[in-house]
Amino acid sequence: MGRQRQLILTIAAAVVAVAIGVVLSYVIHWFPVQASTQAHNTDRLFHVLVDASIPIFVLVVTVVLYCAWQFRMKPGEELKDGPPIHGNTRLEVVWTTIPAVILLALVSYSFVILHDNEKKPAREIHVGVTGQQFAWSFQYPPSVTGGAPVESDQLYLPEGESVQFALHSKDVIHAFWIPAFRLQEDVVPGITVKYRATPDRLGTYPIVCNLLCGLGHSLMRATVHVVPRAQFQQWLKSHAGATVAGGSSSGATTSTTAAAAG
Ligand SMILES: [Cu+2]
């Protein structure tokens, strides 16, 4: 087989590998359901990054395999040395410029997506999130409840409305993670971390602490309920003045006590 035929064969195999990789990247369900507008953006970014990585991965592997196949040492060549090559300016310019351009393009696209995800909308509601070993609690200020503040161990959110979370920790570093929203932020004692999400799909989704925070870490779960505006309003009303019994360190679920029905 001539060198040219081998090269064509190799390129054809590489093209097929890229095609299979791209198809697989769309067939595989990488993530849970998308329940926020940010989730759509994040997943699109992920797909672009994966689809950009596949040809690069295939190129590198193909060059390695082709060289091992074509330029390996043959019997009797044990003492031969390779040709004394020192530098190749054109090659170096090409293999520096192309990756730099690809990298800059992907970084810019990521910046646009992340900037878009965190953009301040015209209207948003504010919800406090408190992490402590080993439970989450959620605070709704009067600006949201229209009356007394509400605290709950359940997170209720109205569908289609942007929420700004203000994250606090009472003890150690936790991570507030809602996989369906593609939202994760560290919850650090002493500082308030803010984050936005716009739930756009009705349903209940898990909230997970995603940073090892102690013995009960695996139990530090809660649920977010994305509900229509009217139901959200009703839930707030039925919990008017409610607080969560704090200070639990046993991993037991905190209880919600409703004050006088209002
Ligand atoms: Cu944790």
Image: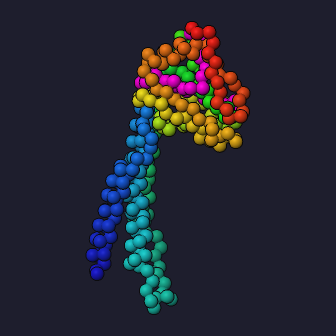
Q: Is residue 69 above or below residue 62?
A: below
The N terminus, quarter of image: bottom left
Q: Which residues are magenta?
A: 147-171
- Residue 106 visible at all: no
Residue at (44% x, 43% y) in the render: 31
Residue under the image location 44 percent in, 53 percent down:
100
If the image is split into quadrants, where does the C terminus sit?
A: top right
Give the vertical position of 184 relative to 92 (above or below). above
Identified at 42% across, 64% down, the residue is 60
- Write down the quadrant of residue 66 in the picture: bottom left
Q: Nearer the viewer, residue 126 or 232?
A: 232
Q: Residue at x 67, y 32 (%)?
A: 252
Q: Is residue 131 magenta?
A: no
Asked whether residue 18 is in view, the answer is yes
Q: Quadrant of residue 153?
A: top right
Measured as percent of width and height from the top left, residue 74 is found at 43, 86
The spot of residue 220 in percent (x, y) is: 62, 36
Rendered view: 249 above or below 19: above
Find residue 193 and report its image quarter.
Answer: top right
Q: Position of residue 107 (x, y in %)?
A: 45, 45
The one nearer the camera, 111 or 136, is: 136
Q: Is residue 193 left or right of residue 94?
A: right
| Residue 218 against residue 137 in the figure, above or below | below
The percent coordinates of residue 188 (x first, y second) are 65, 34
In the displayed structure image, the side of residue 19 where residue 46 appears, left or right: right
Compared across the picture, whether 141 is left or right of 8 comes to: right
For the image shown, how many numbered marks are present on the structure? 0
